[in-house]
Image (cartoon, rainbow, N blue to C red):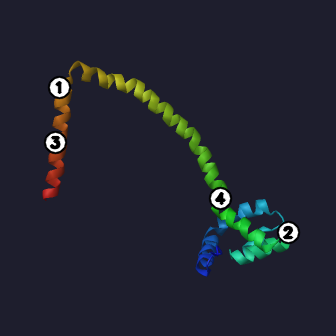
């Protein structure tokens, strides 16, 4: 079985490459510093033109450059990595806040429930009946 991409797949990839070209330019320039920004812009995001440009500037094989650019399209960009790095401290803060909330709020809720379990069950049932009545009333109209 031949694993070569079909013309439709190649066309689709070339289209996606052109759509993401502007976000790929900094990474292309980082990997191939001999390629100028102006030369890249002159390709207008054409995958084949970018491959030819990089191959000619660095004396690389066209197929090697094609595979490297395809891999680049599948890697998360620098923006994604920096966004993930910014989320890490926020995630830690959220965990701390949840732990704090759990330690302060839980005793305030548990104590009345343990002291009056029947009243707690009656209140929960009443809220459930009220919510059900409101939801069913909305369906009838």
Q: In which quarter of the image is residue 106?
A: top left
Nearer-N-terminus badge (1/3): 1
Nearer-N-terminus badge (3/4): 4
Query: Label 1: which residue?
Result: 119
Secondary structure state at the residue bearing disc 3: helix
Asked if marks 1 and 3 touch (Cβ < 8 Å), the reply is: no
Tell me the number on the disc at residue 58.
Answer: 2
How far is disc 3 from disc 4 in space, using C-alphas?
51 Å
How far is disc 1 from disc 4 in space, using C-alphas?
57 Å
Can residue 2 be seen from the camera position used here?
Answer: yes
Tell me: residue 14, above or below residue 113.
below
Q: Is residue 25 left or right of residue 128?
A: right
- The furthest residue to the right: 59
Please identify, in this view, whether the residue under mark 3 or under mark 4 is nearer the observer.
4
How far is disc 1 from disc 2 in space, using C-alphas?
78 Å
Query: Label 4: which residue?
Result: 75
């Amino acid at each position: 079985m031949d694993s070569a991409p079909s013309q439709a797949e190649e066309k689709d990839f070339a289209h996606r490459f052109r759509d993401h070209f502007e976000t790929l330019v900094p990474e292309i320039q980082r990997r191939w510093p001999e390629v100028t920004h102006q030369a890249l812009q002159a390709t207008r995001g054409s995958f084949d033109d970018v491959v030819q440009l990089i191959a000619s500037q660095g004396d690389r094989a066209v197929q090697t450059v094609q595979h490297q650019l395809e891999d680049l399209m599948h890697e998360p960009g620098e923006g994604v990595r920096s966004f993930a790095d910014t989320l890490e401290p926020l995630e830690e803060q959220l965990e701390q806040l949840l732990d704090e909330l759990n330690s302060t709020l839980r005793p305030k809720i548990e104590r009345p429930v343990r002291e009056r379990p029947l009243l707690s069950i009656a209140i929960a049932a009443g809220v459930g009946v009220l919510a059900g009545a409101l939801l069913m009333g909305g369906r009838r109209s």
